[in-house]
Structures are given as C-alpha cells and as structure tokens.
Amino acid sequence: MSFAPHDVSASFDFSKEETKVLAFWKEIDAFQTSLKLSEGKPEFTFYDGPPFATGLPHYGHLLAGTIKDIVTRHAHVSGYHVSRRFGWDTHGLPVEHEIDKRLGITGKEDVMKMGIDKYNEECRKIVMRYSSEWRQTVERMGRWIDFDNDYKTLNLPFMESVWWAFSELFKNGMVYRGLRVMPYSTGCTTPLSNFEAGQAYQDVNDPAVTVAFPLVDDPSTSLLAWTTTPWTLPSNLALCVHPDYTYIKIHDAERNQTFIIHEGLLKTLYKDPKKAKYKKLGQFQGSDMKGWRYVPLFEYFTDQFEDKAFRVVVDTYVTDADGTGIVHQAPAFGEDDHRIAIANGVLRPDEMPPCPIDDRGIFTKEVPDFAGLHVKAADSPIQKVLKAKGRLVVQSTLNHSYPFCWRSGTPLIYRAIPVWFVRVTPIVEELVANNEGTRWVPQNVGENRFGNWLANARDWNVSRNRYWGTPMPLWVSDDMEEIVCIGSVEELERLSGATGINDIHRDKIDHITIPSQKGKGVLRRVEEVFDCWFESGSMPYAQQHYPFENKELFERTHPADFVSEGIDQTRGWFYTLLVLSTHLFGKAPWKNLIVTGLVLAADGKKMSKSLRNYPDPNIIIDKYGADATRMFLVNSPIVRGDNLRFREEGVREVIARVLLPWLNSFRFFLGHVALFKKVNGIDFIYNAHAPLPNNVMDRWILARCQSLIKLVREEMAAYRLYTIIPRLLDLIDELTNWYIRFNRKRLKGEDGKENTNLALNTLFEALLTLCRTMSSYTPFITENLYQSLRSFIPEDPSAGDTRSVHFLCFPEVKEEYFDVDIERQVQRMRAVIELSRNIRERNNLSLKVPLKELLVFHPDQEYIADIKPLERYIQSELNVRDITFSSDETLSGVRYRAVADWAVLGRKLRKDLGRVKNALPNVASDAVKNFITTGSIVVDGIELVTGDITVQRCLELPAGSEGLYATHTDNDVVVRLDIQIHPDLQGEWLARELTNRVQKLRKKAGLQAIDDINVFYRFEEGSGNELLAAIKGNTEIITRTVGGLPVDVKERKETSEVLIEEEQEVADVKFMLYLARP
C-alpha cells in the first residue's frame, strides 16, 4: 500500500493512524527488509532477557521493550546490522506453580503418583499460553523483533548448550555438592537462591517467645532464649551466647524463678525493668558460659545427639539489639546455626541435623506431637506444650519484615538441604573487575547496588528439586563417589549406549544409566533440575546452540553491545549473566547496560491485578497510541533507575505537548505548500543542496535542528535516553512558537515567491530532520509524516530503498549550519520578547492590543547590533508600533540597584544584617555601578564584596508615569514598554480580532488556505459601530489576512452557499459571522 495523501482538515486519531503504519510495515515486510538492507554492516549485538509467556505483558515489559527498541533501532540507522530475536523462559517455578494449583498438587508424592511424564506434559501445554498476546502487544508498541525465529529454553539446542556450560564449570572444579541451609519455599517445595529470597518481603506479625532452658548442674536456674520461630524449637541442639557480652543471673520475685539473661536486655522479660521485682545474684562473661549443659525442651532427638548437643556454644554473630542475648540453635533451619554447630562439634560437616519436616513444610512422625501440621501452623500448639511444661516465660508478637516466596506467596523458611553449587567466591575479584569495565546507566547502580552485591557474592545454588526444567547432567554412583558430568547429547549416547535422544527433559532421560568405570555398578542421574536463572543466564550462547553451532558468530559478537532490564534484575539476570560469562569466557557479557526503575501505580503502590490500581496497557495504547506511551515512559525518572508512578494523564500530556504541536507544524507546511502552488502555479520541491539561506530565522532553526542531531548522536552513544525528549520538546517549541509564528507572512508569500520557497525549504528540512532524528523514539508519527514528506523529495537512484523512514541512515551533523552569531542574535531577541510579553501579562494587555513604543536598553553596542536587524520580528510578535534601541544610560533613564540573598548574607553579617537591609535600597545608582568594576562597596559603614550582592540594571520611570510605562529586566537587557491603550491603535486591534475570528471559523469549516470565500456579518440594531469603523479604517490589514472585506449579510446573493455561521463576541459586542462560497 502507499499512504493516502494527508488530509489536513480531518481529525487525526494518533492510535488509529498507528494501525495504518503497522499495515504498511507488514505490506513491505519492513523489519526483515531493514535487516536485509543492513547485511554486511558491522554487527551490533543485543541480548534480550526472556520473559515467561504464562502471564500477560505489563507496563514494566512495555518500558523494557521500548528502551530495547529505541537502542536497537538507533544502532540500525547508525550503520549497524542488528539481529533481534525474541526469547521465552519456559521452565521453572512460574510454570510448575500454576500446574500445582490447577491440579491440586501439594508435594513430590502427588507428582510421582501422576508420573513426571504427564506432569511435564501439563507444563509444556501452558508455557506458550499468552505468546500470541505478547506478540500482539510488542508489535503494537512498534517494537521490531523477530518472533518467527525465536528461542525457547525448552528446546533441545538451548538445553544442550546449558549442559555444555555446566560441564565446563564441572571440569574446572567449580561445581560441588554440599549441605547448605537455604531459603526454601514450602509452597513450591524447592530451595531458592539467595537473590530469589530477597524479592518479596512482607510485614507480618509473628510470635515472639522467651523460653527457659534449665541448667543440668543447677536445675533451679534457667537460660532464657528468645525466638520468633517456635516451630524450630523441637529441633533445638544448642544455645549460643556472645563471648564478649556480660550476662546476669537474677531471681524473679513474681515468678519465683532464677534466670540468666544479657545485662542490657531485661526489657524482653519486663515491660519496665526499673519497676520490675527482681534481684541480681551474679554475672558472667559469655566466654565463661561455653560448655554449660541444659535440659532439652523435647526428647525427640536426645538419643541421637545427647552426648554432643544441648550445651552452650559461643559466636560473635549474637547481637544485643533485641531478645535475650542467648540464641536458640536449630542447625537444620538457620545458616549461622548450622555453621556454629559444625564449628563446635555438635555436627559433622556431612551429618544431617534434625529436620523433622517433609517437602511441604509438614511435620513428620519424628515429632509425633505435631505430625501433620505445617510449620507455621504448629507455632501455636508448640507454645501450648511449652506453657504446660512451664518453659514458656514470655509470650508476645512481633511485627517485622519477613521473606516470602516470590512465586507462591507463602512464607519462606530456611532449611538444610543437599544441593549443587557453582563456586562464586573464588571469582569475586574477577566479577568486580569485569563489571567495572562496563558502562551502567545510571552508573551508581552498577557501582553501588550491583557492585556491593558482587563484592559479597556467595556460592550459587543452581539445583532445584523439581521436574519441569533442564535436568542437571550428573550421573552418580549410589555412594556419590563416582560422578560423571555430561556435556552433550552425543556424549550421553556414547557413554550410555542409548540412541535417538531428541529430548532431554526428566521424563525422557531419567531412566538412562551409564556403566561405572570404577566397578560401582551403574550410574544414575541425580534428581535435580537447573535453577531457571541458570538457563536465562546461559541465553547468550544457548540461543545460538553454542558451541555446537554458530561458534564463529557467537565468539565474534560476544560480549553484547547492549542489555537492559529493570532494577530487580541486579540480583537476577544481570548477576547470572555475569557469573557464567566470567566463569566461561573470563569477561563481562555486556558492554553497555541500562537499568530501569519499577513502574508503580499512580498511588505509588505496586501494580496489582487484584487491586485494579492501574489502567490496562492495551486500553492506553488503543486510546493514545504507542508513540505517546513510549515517550511518557522514556521521558521519566525510570530510565535513571528511579521508580515511576504511571499516570494516564501523563500519556495524554505527551499528545498535547509534543505530538499535536509537531503534527500541526507539519499540517501548516502542507497548507502553505498548497497555497504556494495556487498563487504561483509551481509545485514545491525540496532542495537538499540549497545554499545556506540569508534569513536569520532560517539559519537559526536549521542550526537548532543540527543541535538535536548532535545531541541524539552523543547521548545515544552514552546510552542516556532520558536527555533527548526534553530537547525534542524545545525544538518543537522553537519550530512552532518561534520559527513558524515569526515567518507566517513569508510562508504566505508576502515577501515574494523566491523568499516563500526558501522559507518552505527551511521548514521542510526541519520537519524531515525531526522525522529522521526521532524515528527510533517515535516510530509511528515519524513514519506517517515521512510518507507525506517523501512526495516533495526528488527521486535519487543512489539513495537506495527510501520507502520507510526507518530505512534511512541517521542524519550527519552539518557543521556549516552552525553559526554562533546567529544563535546569539536569536537568543537575545527571544529574551527581549519574553521580557516584554511578561510586562503585557502583568498588565493584562493581550498581544492583540497594539502598543505604541518599546525601549530596549543594553550598555553593549554589540547586543543592540545583534537584535536591531530582527526589529521586524520583535514588532510583529509584540504588536508594538515603534522600537527604540539604546545604549545611552542617561537618555534611557537607566539606574543600578543592588540586591542580596539575605539568607546567605545573614550567615556572614549576623547582627549587622539589619543595618545593611535598611540601607541597601538607598545606595546611589552610581555607587552600585562602580561596584561592578571595583568589587567593593560600603553600606552603612559595612563593606560588601563580590559575592555578597548582585547588581541589577533597571529603568527609572519619570515621576507620575507609573501607569504609562512598565519595565522588566533579566539582569542583562532592560526593556520599557508603553502600556497605554492609544485610541488610534484600538481600531487596528479590533480589526485583528475580527480577522482572528474569521480564521478560526475557516478552520472549523475545514477550509484550506487556497479556498476562496466571502465573509458576511450581522450586528444587532445600533451595535457594532466601533467594529464597523475598524473595518473601514483597516481595510489593508483585513484584506491581506482573509482575502477580502467582510460585508453586511444583507448583501449576500441567494446563490451564495453559506458554509458556516457562528455567533462571535469582540470587545463585549456580540454579532453573527458567516462564511459563504463566492
């Protein structure tokens, strides 16, 4: 399809117009065509973090996709070949959790009963559930990425590369099996990595109990321990104290019991220790208490551990922030507990501590009193038993932040589990160094948040006791002494004798055995699968099936030029990418990284489907369009790593502030091109090689366009996307409110055909530059406008494929367009105009009211020389009859006054501030002027120097003229405006108001600049005399603007068709205005 000619009179629905662009892209196969056009160019590599297709895309995905699209589009137009493949995360907890909920699966037994093959088949069915919705939304947002050649983590080539990566780590001694207390999800029945455990904290109320542990050698005295996890007490093996703390022995009079507690933590035992009835009997150093034996709370594990457990151990991890300073130790449920138990000989390193719960967190028959209860549900029954035993001393609750499973929403526990680790601690220094060699935007996230995380990185648990994932390729003997790590399907077939393996999920390979090389029978695969973060961290090479295929391509394009995700991935995907790349290739996997904040609801809370606290993304896109949504997201704090509150009105504002003014300037151009043809009989053709124009405003706007090109080049090279939209806003303002506004008469043809053609050429170049420069940010509006602009560009066989703006190269900066003198001239002219506009606003004088005189003063003749040639623009814009430029202070009445920042000066002068404050307004003008050169002035006997005060120039109005003139200054130029309404100018203002109403009515009627019409009026009897006189006295202005003089409607011929009629009001006079065909 070719774009239909743009109808400047039709309303422009941005969203609907975008669907036309999508259809056009589809017809010309724009994305694939762009890839073909860039073949052979240098590669720009981009890694896309794979999402799950089990959920629908949200604003966070839209933001990430927009940033990725902007950067890769810009790389393409900057001369690179940019392959872009979409990827899908298809394994792991997000998928399994849904199946567990749907099928009512609560643990391993249910899966075994069902069969892993059937369970995995159920998982496979849902992994791509919303893939079509994802594709629809991603493409609707204007993102160009290949869905047809996507990668999935469940495909054999991907999984085989994951096996290869792990086997390389295994060969290098970077894999080991260890008993480790890990964050554990009872909802998903699997351990989590440390970074997963930190993703979902919630404030909860937990029991906080103080429990008595009588001493074996002094049963009347009890050690007091405090815990918020009563469910761990049946597994208690020790009590820990700090070796350097002081503990006291007290007798509690009310309870008639003797306790040992930290000297500074009596508040745990008593609400008000000062009023409490107790007596201090003695004190001990923590180190002296080591080895004291106590009576166990329960008898469940005494037979197994009595000879080495149930005694006091010491460690400096104990704090005195809360509790009792004595910590109960359950080595199966606390990382420090486990470490301390081994260090003190309570456990052997390979010995499993008491862990009387199953995979679901349900107590087993090892603790018959609580068997069948979930650990959190057992808190209350355990407290009842302790109370009955007389061991529960204080029973209360504590509100604190507690980790929850990010997927199932259940509270996490810590649990000792045999797991497989990848060593990270030996490469911490290398990780830090590799990261420091990359660019983060913003840099502080990479240096601080991520850098600190790396510096304290621990070994990574990569195994999961689950079913739907890439199986760990470890075949082991029954005694775990012989371990074979498989790195490919071919190797598995060779060592096992199995053939035709085309799927390596658990249900397809768990039965395969490998003969032992050490006489240990057969080796069987371990049950675990990989943590899905290991898979996504492997995507750079696994998507290419490296090293089995694409070896040269991967090695040539690794590391990636660019990656981007949200700030939550600092402990997720960014981390796993870096760990694996450092291990395997010795370098970081990216060169440049943009990290974004989180998209929150308008109220600052997390977006929640259940709360419905945010608008559906698809509704926003359908209502306002993708360009507006993209610009709102990118022009926000979120691309600097801060969070964004999503506001629908923010998207609406983008249309009002950016897209509509941009569109209107384009339509203005089309209207005046049509007028140029009507008047001169000539089609406008853009001349890209036109000599530099002489007109100051032409030169200025072209230079401003080059500034935008230069800025986008520089900032995109630094990956600072957030600096570009503000500059675009400036340029659109400069184009619409300065260039077009100041050149309306030229563009209408009032300065002759040649001048009009030059102005149209300049306006065209500005519009084309905007389209080419911003095509990566706003792909739809730039394509739409470009399709109309193309018709004015002469055919050039050497230009290549120009069917789409996205096929064009990014514009080069035309250094010859820059002119510091012209930019300075226009900047100074704008300062004069803005100061004068401000005077009008302060005095409620519309710009349509003609004023008599403007005085512009500046002491520097160069300033005056700069703006004098632009007098016509200033007169027209400010609607003043005469302008006087002066550098003569005396004639202009210029005076100098001193102003101070009193807060700053007050810190210096202190008690003398009042004297200066009173005297400063009365300091003579000449004395203040002299301060400019000397840098010193004495005020009421107090010397002030440079930095203490600021000098302002002002115009002193003659006595009695306050209502006649008004002044303003920006501390550089000073203006004085005659603010009187002069009767001889009033008629001119009325004439302008009338023509303004006619022009608005023409627009409402859908008329173009080339359409001739007659204008008629009808006044009520006896009214409108001033307006009629204004028409009579200003015939030239009115005729030049609207093409003829309005006449009384009584003179309209019956054959003249009325196109539109509307009541108007000017200067409190109401009348009817008619537009009719001649």
Image (cartoon, rainbow, N blue to C red):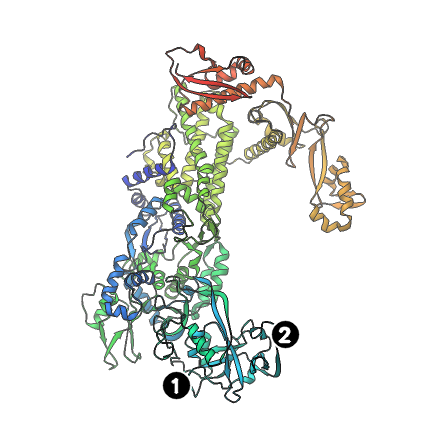
Q: Image quarter for residue 595? A: bottom left
- Which mark identifies residue 783? none
The x, y position of residue 1024, in whole percent, is 54, 15
Left or right: where 1015 falls relative to 933: left
Residue placed most toward the observer, 608 or 391:
391
Q: Which residue is mark 1?
A: 304
Say which quadrant the N terminus sits in. top left
In the figure, 807 relative to 910: above or below? above
Residue placed most toward the observer, 137 or 563:
137
Q: How many marks?
A: 2
Q: Which residue is mark 2?
A: 275
Question: Does the image show residue 817?
Answer: no
Q: Residue at x 44, y 79 (%)?
A: 236
Residue placed most toward the observer, 969 or 851:
851
| Tag 2–tag 1 contact (CB < 8 Å) | no
Amino acid type at circle 1 is Gln
View extreme (bottom): residue: 217
Q: Image quarter for residue 790? A: top left
Q: Marks 2 and 1, how far apart in space?
A: 44 Å
Rate crowding at label 2 as few (under 14), some (14 to 19) or many (20 or more) other CA atoms within 10 Å. few
In the figure, 164 relative to 853: above or below? below
Amino acid type at circle 2 is Lys
The x, y position of residue 414, in whole percent, is 42, 71
Q: Residue at x 45, y 52 (%)?
A: 600
Q: Image quarter for residue 828? A: top right
**If you read the primary sequence from the N terminus, does the residue marked by circle 2 or circle 1 appear first?**
2
